[in-house]
Image (tube, rainbow, N blue to C red):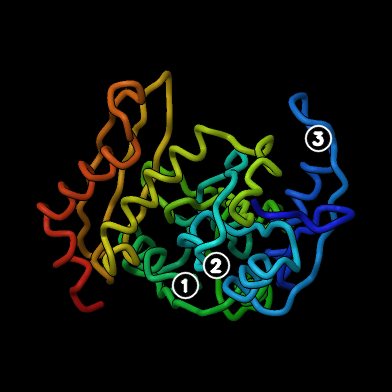
């Protein structure tokens, strides 16, 4: 069984502001405790690098746990496990525009900056008369592009804006029904060394785990096509509902699949439902659609 470091629980994070905000939310949850578990002493430990180097620090015993977006893939180190998914935050995307504009009130030719091909395709599907540029930038840089006048609007994760205390920049929240987002968006994954899962058991939220696992199963099964896919799951009165949409790169076409099942009807509801959704998307030509030129 894995052993913990002595003293406070060490929560590793890179120095990226968003990574720090995500990790701090878990530190706060551990430190405040819950009705099921007393508060424990926890502290942030800054580490160089992101993702794999941070996980390597966890595997090597430098820290006791790390916090990542649930949008990421599985742990890259075999000795690491996802111990908990805390209750999910806002899974929506948000528009942050100059002059309090909404998406529909953007002027023709307005420049919109995003950080993914999926967001670009969705934006063009809704407004083919705007210019959408994909930038490999973080949220702060995308927002600065709007503030400086280099762009009219940016589309980013609502949950990440919330964690950075930047919700005042939002001029419109984009609803999941018409604008599905990345698998696991808005949720966090708490990673520990295998054998230490009980350390964060009190943070786990089972509905979030089921939904995230279903969404990520869709993403994983779609392979490269997932870069142009949005997926959205909810649980309501024991019913797991899962919907996914794949776009052409230029937003000119899309295919959608939605299915539901009762959680108690099958042994692995997340996996079963994802199979149904992906099979239909593929039958509708999702792979060919996503492979077309922008």
**Circle 2 SS class:** strand
Q: CA distance from mark 3 to mark 2?
A: 39 Å
Mark 2 vs mark 1: give the one in front: 2
The numbered mark at residue 264 is none
Q: CA distance from mark 2 to mark 1?
A: 8 Å
The reply, left or right, for residue 219 in relation to residue 198 is: left
Q: Which residue is mark 2?
A: 153
Indicate whether 278 appears above or below 237: below
**Mark 2–mark 1 contact, CB under 8 Å?**
yes
Residue extending farthest top: 237
Where's residue 66, x and y in %? Answer: 67, 59
Where's residue 270, x and y in %? Answer: 35, 39
Q: Which residue is mark 1?
A: 110
- Residue drawn at x 60%, y 59% is 68
**Circle 1 SS class:** loop
Indicate whether 247 appears above or below 188: below
Mark 3 vs mark 2: give the one in front: 3
Where's residue 45, x and y in %? Answer: 81, 66
The numbered mark at residue 33 is 3
Q: CA distance from mark 3 to mark 1?
A: 47 Å
């Amino acid at each position: 069984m894995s052993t913990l470091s002595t003293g406070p629980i060490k929560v590793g994070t890179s120095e990226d502001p968003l990574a720090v905000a995500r990790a701090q939310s878990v530190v706060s949850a551990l430190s405040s405790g819950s009705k099921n578990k007393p508060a424990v002493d926890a502290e942030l430990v800054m580490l160089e690098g992101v993702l794999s180097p941070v996980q390597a620090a966890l595997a090597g015993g430098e820290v006791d746990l790390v916090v990542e977006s649930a949008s990421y893939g599985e742990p890259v180190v075999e000795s690491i496990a996802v111990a908990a998914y805390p209750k999910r935050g806002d899974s929506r995307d948000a528009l942050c525009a100059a002059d309090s504009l909404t998406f529909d009130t953007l002027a023709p030719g307005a420049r919109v900056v995003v950080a993914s091909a999926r967001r670009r395709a969705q934006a063009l599907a809704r407004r083919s008369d705007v210019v959408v540029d994909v930038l490999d930038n973080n949220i702060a840089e995308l927002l600065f592009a709007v503030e400086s006048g280099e762009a009219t609007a940016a589309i980013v994760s609502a949950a990440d804006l919330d964690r950075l205390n930047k919700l005042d920049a939002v001029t419109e929240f984009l609803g999941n029904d018409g604008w599905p987002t990345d698998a696991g968006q808005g949720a966090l994954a708490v990673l520990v060394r295998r054998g230490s899962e009980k350390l964060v058991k009190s943070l786990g939220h089972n509905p979030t785990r089921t939904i995230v696992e279903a969404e990520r199963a869709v993403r994983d099964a779609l392979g490269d096509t997932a870069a142009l896919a949005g997926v959205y799951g909810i649980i309501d009165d024991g019913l797991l509902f899962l919907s996914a949409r794949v776009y052409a790169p230029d937003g000119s076409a899309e295919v959608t699949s939605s299915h539901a099942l009762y959680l108690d009807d099958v042994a692995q509801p997340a996996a079963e439902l994802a199979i149904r959704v992906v099979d239909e998307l593929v039958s509708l030509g999702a792979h060919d659609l996503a492979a077309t030129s922008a």
